Image (cartoon, rainbow, N blue to C red):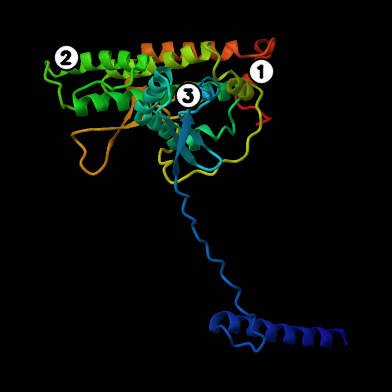
Amino acid sequence: MKFKKLLTLSAGLSVLLGTSIGCAVWGGASDNKTPDKAVKTIRFKPLPDLKTATDTLYFTNENFDAKYAHAAAGQFIPGTNTVRVSYFMYDDTANARVRLNCDNANESVEVVRRHEMEHARKANVVQDVMGLSPWDRARLAVMNESMAPGGEIIEAVEYHIKTGERYPQNRAFLWHADSLIMARHNEKNFGFGDGVPVDFSDPVIADIVLESAVDKFARDHKRGFYHTKIRSELKGVKRSKYKPHNQCDLKPNMSNYFPMANQWGILWTYDVTSPWTILKKRQVDVWNCASETTRRRVINKVDSIVKTDMAAGQMLMLKTFKYPHSNQ
């Protein structure tokens, strides 16, 4: 009885296996065909456009002191991926002081736009602080605010090459850097540098851009700017995830961005005019073109600035500022 039952089960199993094999080979032989599963289509959503906007600010003799002190010449807003640039307007009744300050601000529009565009193009790097300690987050903030004036310097120098005149607005750090760079540029071209694009990869010129930009930030910091930003990074304040725009085309890798090893090349990479490239602008990594001595001097200055914004006792807790930091 047991043997007969076993034989019956074996026969049934053989039929079942044969049917399964037939379905596997011929596909669809069974009446109980399982419906095909829907294939999920993966669609790659393009990055949003970087938006630009122009603000017009109106000044009078009465509102100038209060309004001008808080007026932003330009800004990049990561949340909306928008670069905003301001024009300063006044009417016929404005006094000489109002007119002079507004005219000076308007003469700076192109370098202000370049400043904000540098922030915008590198936002994918600056906004991603995952894995960075509060110490390196604060250093990143300083480097970010320093490299943007570097873009202003390049814009002003290329204006000089194009027009034969230095940038019209007397921003002291621009004119100083321009004079040093043009002197080196003419030396390299044996006194015939007019109209010839500047070689920003030259170590002497790269040193000038790097030091001039960081010194500009250091002066602004000493005047009371950027302290809140640095202190919030030192506290490791959590920030929302950033969604890049379509002009964040500089991609970080170990060779151009590694804060823990003082590699900041991606932040100091700029588009520059070049006679050797036809289809697009040439990019120059000023950080890695500069001399080791200048890079070390800049790093020491940045570290010194960050230390001045640390809370009392923070330097005693060095493990808090080592990589990686678990609370990021």
Q: What SS does tag 2 mark? A: helix
Would residue 25 be seen by someone viewing this image from the given angle? Answer: yes
Q: Which mark is residue 319?
A: 1
Question: How far apart are the alpha carbons under marks 3 and 2?
Answer: 31 Å
CB atoms of marks 3 and 1 within 8 Å: no
Q: Amino acid at mark 1?
A: Lys
Q: Position of residue 108 (x, y in %)?
A: 36, 26
Query: In the picture shown, does residue 47 fall above or below 314?
Result: below
Residue type, mark 2 in image: Glu
Q: CA distance from mark 3 to mark 1?
A: 26 Å
| C-alpha separation, residue under disc 2 versus residue under disc 1 | 49 Å
Residue 92: image quadrant is top left
Q: Residues within 10 Å of mark 3 (few under 14, many from 20)?
A: many
For the C terminus, the image quarter is: top right
Q: Amino acid at mark 3?
A: Glu
Residue most extreme to the front = 93
Q: Which residue is mark 2?
A: 187
User: Of the residues under marks 2 and 1, which one precedes in the sequence?
Assistant: 2
> Which residue is the site of mark 3?
145
